[in-house]
Image (cartoon, helix red, strand yellow):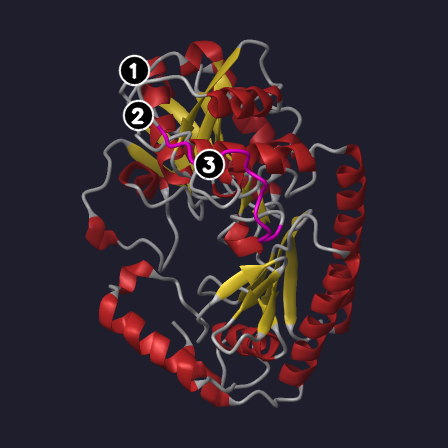
Amino acid sequence: MKVSKSTLDYINRDKSIFATVQHIADLPFVISKAQGFYLYDTEDKAYLDFTSGACTMNLGYDRAHVADSTSFPFPYALGCAQIEYGSRLIEKYTFYKDKKMMFCVTGSDANDGAIKIVRAYSQRKMVVTFSGNYHGTTYGAASLTSLEGRLDNHLGPMLPYITILPFCPYDASDEAVDECLARFTSLDLNDVAGVFLECIQGDTGMLPINTTFLERLNAICKEHKILIVSDEVQMACYRTGPFFSIENYPFVKPDLITMGKHIGGGIPLGAIIGRQEVMQSLKPCEHAFSMAGNFEACMRGLYNFNIIEDRDFKLQLAKRIALMDFFMDDLCHNFSDIVIKCCGVGLARAVFVRSLYTSDTDNEACYKIICSCFGRGLYLMRIGSNWLRLEPFLNMPEDLMLKAFDIIKEAFYEYRSNKIDDGVKKYMS
């Protein structure tokens, strides 16, 4: 993998300016611009982005047509853009007739706000989440998050009365389901305010939650008046098929839903939508931010929302999902020596890989494959483990999806032939 002098110069300048916390940089890649479905480096080489900008740009990098870019947020007044966009978003929350919402700045602070809401409404202390969930890096959200290598124990003490239980994945045995439920019911359920779900774990390999476990957990929560919060920061807006990923489990009626990432069309924006009596638990200023619901983000978000709600768009999205299904089956079949398993639904997929050579760990094998893709002009993410993250733009044309699939298969063939230079490992973060 050749790295240009201009890229190395920028990387060195970056290291001299920014703390290590600034980036999750796994490739020697400096982006000079983004356009359409491509990222461009300092030499103007194009890379097809198969991550949707870490799910912050669901419809590519073309600028939304915002009517008035001169308006600025003002937190002590109503905003037309907020009202227009909010009225459309809240329509998608169909679990309860009476509902309210609020805008935040990010998905992380939306989850912080949800912690406040479930405690204020229930007047209970404990909040439950599951290992492998990623809810964000603000302090409350970080307290809910348990990801090896991402948030370490040296940040403590974290928020009190947070309980993290084992995640029950889609392929768990009946015995494992019973054990996970037993861990939950062993708690003092009369002091549990809410349960935070990431029903498809985006940063742990697109792992869906076990259906039987969730159905039984939901029944217990309803019996004990425990609120259910569905974290949809990464998966909302048809990423997994339905608008919200929790809708893949129709027996669950979440009391709150948190959103972020892509809903601002490239400008930071978060949201909490939920049952009216629950949402009304906070008073003004108890979760307020000057930039929450700013005009630019709401107008961009509304522009994109209108696109994805178009009937023809949904039909085309279904075809893209079918194409992804076919590719995943093909990859698993033709590279069963390398592929451990394929996970996920819709356009949120993961491919877990194993090493074929004693010189590589599974993690290093995955990194080599990503480097091979990168050298061919395809940008993928690894999130520090042995799985490829495949999350293409929701509107990516079929020919570009097929191009990405061909590159991925070429990279797998190259790894199988042991032709990827070990030298690429020096760039691993």
| Image coords of residue 257 (percent x, y) | 50, 28
Which residue type carries mark 1?
A: Pro
Which residue type carries mark 2?
A: Ala
- Which residue is the site of mark 1? 284
- Which residue is the site of mark 3? 296
In the depicted structure, whether residue 234 falls above or below residue 127: below
Kindly check if marks 1 and 3 are in contact, taking CB atoms under 8 A apart as contact: no
Q: Is residue 349 left or right of residue 77?
A: right
* In magenta stretch: residue 62: yes
In the depicted structure, whether residue 19 falls above or below residue 315: below
Q: CA distance from mark 1 to mark 3?
A: 23 Å
Q: Earlier in the sequence, mark 2 or mark 3?
A: 2
Q: In this view of the protein, can residue 5 be seen by the observer?
A: yes
Secondary element under disc 1, as helix, strand or loop, is: loop
**Magenta span covers which residues?**
60-73
Which residue type carries mark 3?
A: Glu
| Image coords of residue 264 (percent x, y) | 50, 38
Q: Residue at x 44, y 31 (%)?
A: 295
Count how many numbered circles sit on residues in the image.
Answer: 3
Q: CA distance from mark 2 to mark 3?
A: 18 Å
Kindly check if marks 2 and 1 are in contact, taking CB atoms under 8 A apart as contact: yes
Q: Is residue 311 left or right of residue 274?
A: right
Q: CA distance from mark 2 to mark 1?
A: 7 Å
Q: Earlier in the sequence, mark 1 or mark 3?
A: 1
